[in-house]
Image: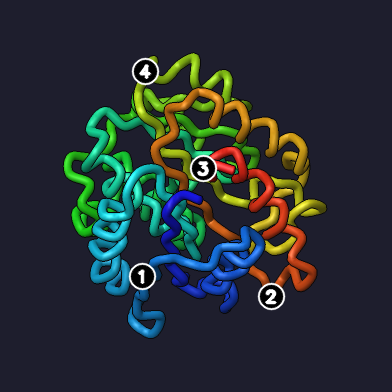
Amino acid sequence: MSALVQVPWCSRFHGGGMEEGPAAVAAALGADESTTVDIDMEAPPEDALAAGLPEVQAAVADAGPSPLVLLGECTLAPAVTAGLRTSHPGLVLVWVDAHGDLNTPETSPSGFLGGMPFAVLLGWCHDRLRAAAGLDPALPEERAALVGARDLDPGERAAIERSRLATTDDVAAALSILPDGAPIHLHLDGDVLDPADAPGVDFPAADGWSGNRLDAEMAALAATGRVVGVSLCCGNPRRDPDGRGARAYARALQPFLGR
């Protein structure tokens, strides 16, 4: 199995539970060894991230080839990109998510930091967090693709239209647009699945991918041989006591795990 890194932190914007997602997915994978990065859950979220993101970046950079990084919240993803880019300066990002995570403080309806990490990666907002993650300079828009999004806020749609960011319905289309041959960071938010397949998410969106669709999309990415690291936002086990989502994510990740 690839080196496993767990970051059991979330901002608790909708209450607790997402911090338990990494352990649930690790158990579904049958993983018995991992590196855990602990971030203060009691500090204000932005301060906690500013302190914790450098530790996530360092853990990913030190994890060896093709790490799998299990996250409590997508706000942690910029540090994964930064950690992978230390060894792969030509990195591109494939962000698979029901949501855009492309809001800024000016466009966000709620102010939720978890709705902004892709925008942070691209240098659109929260430069303090991007710097803390070690992502300097920001990832160029033309080196990133949003795949599978079906629940976008108006401000996100407007920003996408102004940007050079690729937005596609499937992995194949994203790969046809991104720079050919570049190493890939795959970031997967489990809520790309339909709530029927993965009920344990804090922000469910109807009409998502089936588990079989996710398996096929992940297999297509793995077949390129270009994925150098995977991060997963693991969902909220308290909303999925049967572990349906964790099992679906574990199955979809198999092509990346050398099994």
Which kind of residue does numbered mark 1 sit on? Answer: Val
Which mark is on residue 179?
A: 4
Which mark is on residue 100?
A: 3
Residue under the image location 66 percent in, 62 percent down: 28
Mark-to-mark CA distance, 3 and 2: 24 Å
Which kind of residue does numbered mark 4 sit on? Answer: Pro
Dots 2, 1 in contact, CB < 8 A: no
**Which of marks 2 and 4 precedes in the sequence?**
4
Dots 3, 1 in contact, CB < 8 A: no
- Nearer the observer, 215 or 95: 215
Residue under the image location 38 percent in, 85 percent down: 42
Which kind of residue does numbered mark 2 sit on? Answer: Arg
Which kind of residue does numbered mark 3 sit on? Answer: Gly
Mark-to-mark CA distance, 2 and 1: 21 Å
The image quarter in which residue 168 lies: top right
**Which of marks 1 and 2 precedes in the sequence?**
1
Graded by Cα atoms within 10 Å as few (under 14), some (14 to 19) or many (20 or more), the crowding at tag 1 reads some
Residue under the image location 58 percent in, 20 percent down: 172
**Which of marks 1 and 4 precedes in the sequence?**
1
Q: Percent x, y for residue 11?
A: 45, 72
Quadrant where the C terminus is found in the figure: top right
